[in-house]
Amino acid sequence: MALVVPAAGEAEMLERIVGNPTQTTNGDVHIHLYKNNYTPIESSVLGDFTELVDATDQNYALKPLTAASWSPSSSNPTVMEYTQQTWTFLGIPDNFIPVYGYFVTADNDTTLLWAERFTDAPYNIPETGGSVSITPKLELA
């Protein structure tokens, strides 16, 4: 599945790209995992995603992606990459955790910036635990 920038996040994404001086955020964003069977579309909003939660999804927490830590891809100048992010789950007895994809919010967690469903979703984390790894990338096309 391709990365989707919903209409709700387009204006902020443009402001971040051009370094708009009226932009009040510091450029950091948060990456979240979601567990509902949903495919992001241009009209997606935060309420469309069911984020994993620590109380039921064993050891989950959103991760910050700091603006200064993005770097250009060595193989493609139109791609910015972030280091791989890994979530390690403890597991839930008699259950599994489905992970369908991820979404990214501004640092206030109220603005959806982009989202992506895994092409081979869901990743079912077994009751014994497991992990999910993502290498965040942004590409201009």
Image (tube, helix red, strand yellow):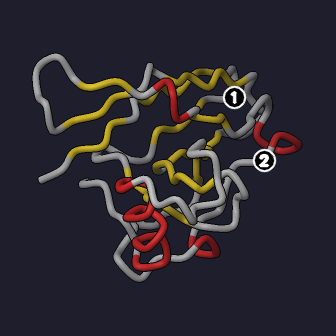
Q: Which residue is labeled 2 in the image?
A: 53
- Give, as a three-letter code, the residue at label 2: Val
| Residue shown at the point (40%, 34%) measured from the top left | 136
The N terminus sits in image quarter: bottom left
Q: Is residue 89 left or right of residue 49?
A: right
129 and 17: which one is in front? 17
Nearer the N terminus, badge 1 or badge 2?
A: 2
Determine the secondary structure under disc 2.
Answer: loop
Kindly give the residue lying farthest to the right in the view shown. Answer: 55
The quarter of the displayed image where residue 135 is located: top left
Give the percent coordinates (x, y) of residue 124.
Answer: 52, 38
The quarter of the displayed image where residue 62 is located: top right
Considering only vertical position in the picture, is 69 above or below 98? Answer: above
Q: CA distance from mark 1 to mark 2?
A: 16 Å
Considering only vertical position in the picture, is 105 above or below 126? Answer: below
| Residue shown at the point (40%, 68%) measured from the top left | 40
Kindly give the residue lying farthest to the bottom in the view shown. Answer: 43
| Residue shown at the point (22%, 23%) measured from the top left | 73
| Residue shown at the point (28%, 47%) measured from the top left | 119
Marks counted in the figure total 2
Q: Which residue is labeled 1 in the image?
A: 127
Q: Is residue 63 left or right of residue 22?
A: right
- Give, as a three-letter code, the residue at label 1: Glu
Give the percent coordinates (x, y) of residue 86.
Answer: 55, 22
Determine the secondary structure under disc 1.
Answer: loop
- Label 2: how many Cα within 10 Å (few below 14, some 14–19, many 20+): some
134 and 23: which one is in front? 23
Dots 1 and 2: beta carbons under 8 Å? no
Give the percent coordinates (x, y) of residue 57.
Answer: 76, 40
